[in-house]
Image (spheres, rainbow, N blue to C red):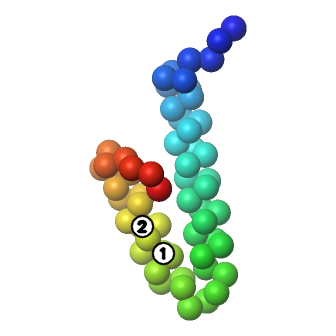
Amino acid sequence: MQIDPNSRNMQGITSFLTFVALNVLYLLCCLPVVTIGVATSALYEVTIRYSDDERGRP
């Protein structure tokens, strides 16, 4: 049995793992309390672009 990388399930898993990675990066950037505002605005910008189908690399 082969896995089709263009299937709907694989695209969903890829999107999920992308958001997990973004959240981990967000938490790492928030460790120094000074950068919480910048990290939040960057996460917001990436999620807005992702929802508008302007997909690039996060």
Q: Residue furthest top?
A: 1
Q: Which residue is drawn at 53% across and 35% down?
A: 12
Q: Which amino acid does label 2 sit on?
A: Tyr
Q: Quadrant of the N terminus?
A: top right
The residue labelled by disc 1 is 40
Tally the marks. Answer: 2
Numbered label attached to residue 44 = 2
Q: Is residue 45 left or right of residue 10?
A: left
Asked whether the residues under the numbered discs 2 and 1 touch, taking CB atoms below 8 Å apart as contact, a structural biologist would say yes
User: What's the residue at 37%, 47% (across, down)?
Assistant: 55
Q: Residues within 10 Å of mark 2 (few under 14, many from 20)?
A: few
Q: Position of residue 56 (x, y in %)?
A: 39, 50
Disc 2 versus disc 1: distance between alpha carbons? 6 Å
Q: Where is residue 50 in the image (x, y as percent from the top left)?
A: 38, 51
Type of amino acid at the residue the image marks with label 1: Thr
Q: Which mark is residue 23?
A: none
Is 28 rendered above or below residue 52?
below
Work out which residue is located at the far front of the displayed protein and give it.
57
